[in-house]
Structures are given as C-alpha cells and as structure tokens.
Amino acid sequence: MQEYQLTFIDLALRRNALRFGQFTLKSGRESPYFFNAGLFDDGEALAVLGQCYAAALQRSGVGYDMLFGPAYKGIPLVAATAVALADHHRHTVPWAFNRKEAKDHGEGGLIVGRALQGRVVIVDDVITAGTAVRESIELIRRAGAEPVAVLLALDRQERGQGKRSAVQEVEETMGLKCVSLLTLSGLIETLAGAAAGERGRIPDEQLAALRAYRERYGVA
C-alpha cells in the first residue's frame, strides 16, 4: 500500500466520504459501504485529494499531455490534480473541462480551458455505468486528441450486468488504462490491518460484510 493510498483512506474516513452500514445502490444491490466524493467539500480536503490523484498518476507511468475533467464532479478534481502536479511534482500540464450545454455567446463551445490536444487523461471520481467516460472519449476524439487513461478515486471491482466490472469494460472495450487511488480489495486489506491496530478501526462485522460483498459481486 502506497502512502498516498493510506492518505486517501484517512481523508475519506475523516470527511465521512467513505461510510459503512447498509446502502441501497442504484443497481438495487445492498452494499455495506458507500463512497461520496462530493463530501471532499472544502479547500483542505480538495488539496489533499489532488495530491493523492497526482501521486497515483505519476506512479502509473502513463504518458500524457493534458488532463480533462468531465462535468460536473470531474471539474474540481481535474483542477486540484493539475495544481498538485505543479506544486508537488514540478510538472505543469494544461487542463480542461466540458460544459453540459454548449455556450452560444462569448467564446462559445463546450470546452473550457486548454483546447483538447495530444494524449489526454480523464479525471473523475468513480466509474459506475461508464456513460460519462464514453461521452468524454467521444468529445476528446472529435477534437482530434487521444484519450489514453482514466484517473479514478475508487475502483469498486464489482460486476455490472455481465461478468466484467465497469473499470474492466473501459480497459477492455474502450482501450483506456484505468488508474485508481484505491480498489475495494486494497481497502479491505488496509482495514483488516486497522483491526489489528495499524490504522483506524471498524467493527469486525462491517469488515466481514465487506468481504462477503466482495465475494458475492466482485470480479477477479
């Protein structure tokens, strides 16, 4: 487990962005945990989150020329990541995001920030159905640029309608590399260590529920 991953877990727990209990997902599944990146809602949290994203991207070895954040959650994430790359890795990269609807006055268009060009990394929180990623890929390619990777906070490692997860669908069907700060397996491993006194503790029954959920719905 990398230091940025432990930092991300600590931040998510402190800000209640990662909660444990019983939650009904959009899929209808009953999940023992819930992740809400919208709760990283102040300057300190966003700064630390951006540092985690930047560290994960640097460690991935992905070659890229700019970053793109799909509206809406991707907008603060891509900005925070670009700032962290400049501040902590001495790597200044351009970034952009899209509007949901094209602006018909002023500068117009769908893209705000640097014009899409070269190799582009899409920055978002999670992949659920993959719809936002598909839309981003189409938008980037229409601009003549090349989407190369998706940078995420959490990979749930959970099957969709078929045998593959949303992340696997993106990697295998769309041909993009997915870089995640954390996977469900990594979270379980870290929390198991926490139960032994290494980091923040959760009740044994919640840890068992996470393992059971992973066993039932997880992918290899």
Image (cartoon, helix red, strand yellow):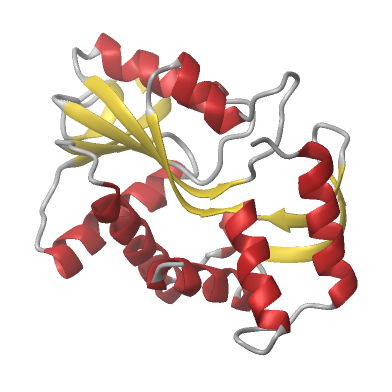
Q: Nearer the viewer, residue 172 or 130?
A: 172
Q: Residue at x 34, y 17 (%)?
A: 139
Q: Quadrant of residue 137?
A: top left
On the rendered structure, is 10 left or right of 164? left
Q: Is residue 125 above or below residue 119?
A: below
Q: Is residue 32 visible?
A: no
Q: Is residue 64 visible?
A: yes
Residue 130, horizontal then vertical, whole percent: 56, 25
Q: Quadrant of the C terminus?
A: top right
On the rendered structure, is 6 left or right of 148? right
Q: How many marks?
A: 0
Q: Residue at x 65, y 25 (%)?
A: 164
Residue 203, horizontal then vertical, whole percent: 84, 78
Residue 72, horizontal then vertical, whole percent: 48, 40
Q: Is residue 141 above or below residue 37?
A: above
Q: Residue at x 48, y 19 (%)?
A: 172
Q: Quadrant of residue 108?
A: top left
Q: Nearer the viewer, residue 172 or 55?
A: 172
Q: Nearer the viewer, residue 91 or 56?
A: 56
Q: Is residue 199 above or below residue 75?
A: below
Residue 92, horizontal then vertical, whole percent: 10, 53
Q: Quadrant of residue 149?
A: top left
Question: Which residue, as the protein is rendered here, is positioned at the far bottom?
Answer: 197
